[in-house]
Amino acid sequence: MDPILSGSDFNQLRAFVAVGELSSFSRAAELLGVSPSALSQTVRGLEERVGVRLLNRTTRSVALTPAGEILLRRVRPAVAELGDALGEARASRGRPAGVVRIHAFRSAAETCLAPILPAFAEAYPDIVLDITLDDAVVDMVAGGFDAAIRLGEVIERDMVAVRIGPDLRHVPVATPGYLAAHGAPAHPRDLVHHRCIRWRWPGHLMSYAWEFFEHGTWFEVAVDGPLIVNDKEMALRATLAGVGIGFPVEWTVAEHVAAGRLVRLLEPWCAFFPGLHLCYPRQRQMAPALRAVVDALRNPQANLPAKAGSG
């Protein structure tokens, strides 16, 4: 065995790989569950052991040195392999264990995650679900997430995607009061003459385009209006207040439509699109804890305690 190796090498290499991949001590520290100062000391200890600087640090950025790039390329697969091996060893205790970090749209958490949480916690007491609710589409790997719940249309092609919900559609809705005052559009293109409540993806400058389907083709309408928000709950509240026409996912307003508070519009032009999926990076061997999450979301009735379905 190389005399430079010691019992602390794995932790040092894992710390270096995290910082090198994320280019950030703070994000890597959050991923590893340590403080940035402790992480910095760990990486500095590795640099002292190998006798070369691996990272260039400034007050605003972290970048790999040429030596750091070479080391990261060589050790990243080995660190991942060791992590998988340790995961298998933990799994040999007889039940999955560990932390699974999930990034989810807020609506996805409400419809898919929240209903299974009690049963999942009972079935897998050694698994910790670390859930981040955010409507932005983030880089899962850079963010340190194991999986994400997203709409089918915004999943990267190199991800594994498991359907966990039905197809969805957006439908324009407005209050009876708004329609009495402004009339109802007869065609999606008539929306340009209406007050529309627009939604913007978090982190984007432009608002989401309203899409409709006609003669086998999707088309967009450039709507305008008095309000742009990046929170769908606020958009719904404004729609219910009569500020303008909203464009929510249909199931989120079903109760208000049934109660007569909102009226669906332009339904013949509203087509379905791929619904919610659990997605995760391709990997040779899935960690048992992540496998448990995938199975539970894909088929909770078969993979979780039966009494959970009554909750």
Image (cartoon, grey):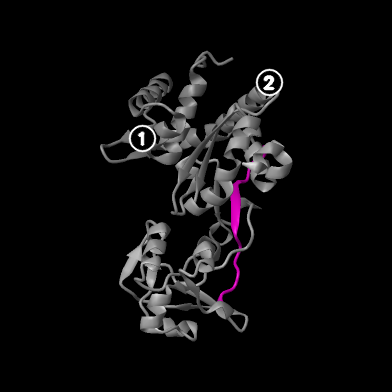
Quadrant, the N terminus: top right
Q: 89 or 61: nearer the eye?
A: 89
Is 265 placed left or right of 30 in the picture? Answer: right
Q: Is residue 279 magenta?
A: yes
Which is more N-terminal, label 1 or label 2?
1
| Disc 2/disc 1 C-alpha distance (Å) | 33 Å
Report x, y in % for residue 123.
65, 31
Report x, y in % for residue 201.
41, 60
> What is the three-letter code of the residue carrying label 1?
Ser
Query: Which residue bears the numbered disc 1?
Result: 26
Q: Is residue 62 magenta?
A: no
Tags 2 and 1 in contact by the CB under 8 Å rule? no
Is 123 placed left or right of 191 in the picture? Answer: right
Q: Mark 2: which secondary structure?
A: loop
By secondary structure, the bulk of the magenta-drawn segment is best described as loop
Quadrant, the C terminus: top right
Res. 67 visible in picture: no
Q: Which residues are magenta?
A: 270-285
Q: Mark 1: which secondary structure?
A: helix
Residue furthest front in the image: 259
> What is the three-letter code of the residue carrying label 2?
Arg
Is 144 placed left or right of 223 in the picture? Answer: right
Task: State the residue at coordinates (67%, 47%).
Answer: 298
Q: Which of label 2 and label 1 is nearer to you?
A: 2
Q: 178 or 41: nearer the eye?
A: 178
Report x, y in % for residue 70.
48, 36
Q: 190 or 42: nearer the eye?
A: 190
Residue furthest right in the image: 302
How would you rate the neighbour count of disc 1 (Cα within 10 Å): few for under 14, some for 14-19, many for 20 or more?
A: some
Report x, y in % for residue 131.
49, 40
Query: Which residue bears the numbered disc 2?
Result: 93
